[in-house]
Image: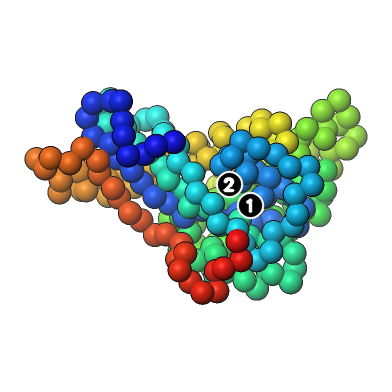
């Protein structure tokens, strides 16, 4: 999506957010990201080493008719293997949002997702962090519910108890993936409306038709962040 041109009149507003994916190995974090960013799925995708960095933009609803709001996600997809766990704080530090992913066919992956949620709340806090719990691989349960190890109600109740967004998706089919990022974008927009209004006021009367509100972002020039 081209964020430098608009077919609509009025102001264009761009918000940039850092988003991190966390979860056990093989739950499909990378597949979710690639479905969102490239609309593709690779059955034999290799495990992430360290972390991968990607970006994507979306337009969100809910802003005024006179302006267009574009969200740019700068996404850190972290490796799920235990040997990389100590690197995770480097990637979730200063994050605006986090996807904590589990596999609906693996009960233990939800246990590990809960541990990630606890770590995020303890280390980052949840006042300015939007956390979304995501159950992936629902396609494996289509027509065979016996393969499901995590009931939707169990995960939904936990998400509600922890004030998390919650989705069940299939990275393979694409079902529900885009809605995750749209919901996060809308939630982040709500939390930044006051800052956005102030930025608009500062540029009131200028000739610019685009307002860029640059928030906390990943440091892509960090020499330790090269594993992508």
What x and y, as percent, mark residue 190?
37, 41
Residue at figure coordinates x 50%, y 49% from the top left: 55
In percent of the image, x 55 and y 69: which residue is there?
225
Q: Quadrant of the C terminus?
A: bottom right
Residue 94 falls left or right of residue 91 = left
Residue at (48%, 71%) from the top-left corner?
222
- Circle 1 — which element? strand
Whether residue 167 is visible here, answered yes or no, is no
Image location of residue 167, percent across then percent down? 63, 38
Asked whether the beta carbons under mark 1 and mark 2 sit within 8 Å of each other, the answer is yes
Given residues 206 and 170, the one toward you in this image is 206
The residue singled out by tag 1 in the image is 100
Residue 153 occupies quadrant: top right
55 up-or-down from 82: above or below: above
Q: Residue 176: where, in percent of width, then height?
A: 63, 32
C-alpha separation, residue under disc 1 versus residue under disc 2: 6 Å
Decide if residue 13 is in sight here: yes
- Above or below, 51 against 182 in this view is below
Residue 104's image quarter? top right
Please tell me which of labels 1 and 2 falls first in the chain: 1
- Where is 149 relative to 117, above or below? above
Q: Is residue 142 left or right of residue 14?
A: right
> What residue sits right under mark 2 in the picture?
132
Q: Quadrant of residue 136?
A: top right
The front one of 201 and 33 is: 33
């Amino acid at each position: 999506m081209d964020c430098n041109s608009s077919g609509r009149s009025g102001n264009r507003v761009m918000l940039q957010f850092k988003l991190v994916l966390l979860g056990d190995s093989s739950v499909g974090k990378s597949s979710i990201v690639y479905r969102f960013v490239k609309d593709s799925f690779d059955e034999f995708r290799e495990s992430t080493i360290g972390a991968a960095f990607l970006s994507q933009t979306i337009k969100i609803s809910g802003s005024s008719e006179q302006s267009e709001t574009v969200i740019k996600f700068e996404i850190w997809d972290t490796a799920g293997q235990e040997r990389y766990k100590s690197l995770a704080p480097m990637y979730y530090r200063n994050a605006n949002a986090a996807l904590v992913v589990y596999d609906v066919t693996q009960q233990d992956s939800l246990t590990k997702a809960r541990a990630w949620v606890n770590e995020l709340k303890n280390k980052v806090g949840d006042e300015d962090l939007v956390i979304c719990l995501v159950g992936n691989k629902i396609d494996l349960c289509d027509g065979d519910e016996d393969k499901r190890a995590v009931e939707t109600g169990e995960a939904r109740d936990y998400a509600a108890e922890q004030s998390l967004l919650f989705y069940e998706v299939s990275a393979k089919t694409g079902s529900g993936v885009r809605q995750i990022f749209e919901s996060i974008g809308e939630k982040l927009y709500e939390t930044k409306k006051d800052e956005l209004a102030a930025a608009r006021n500062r540029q009131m009367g200028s000739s610019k038709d685009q307002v860029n509100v640059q928030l906390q972002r990943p440091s892509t020039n960090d020499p330790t962040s090269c594993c992508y």
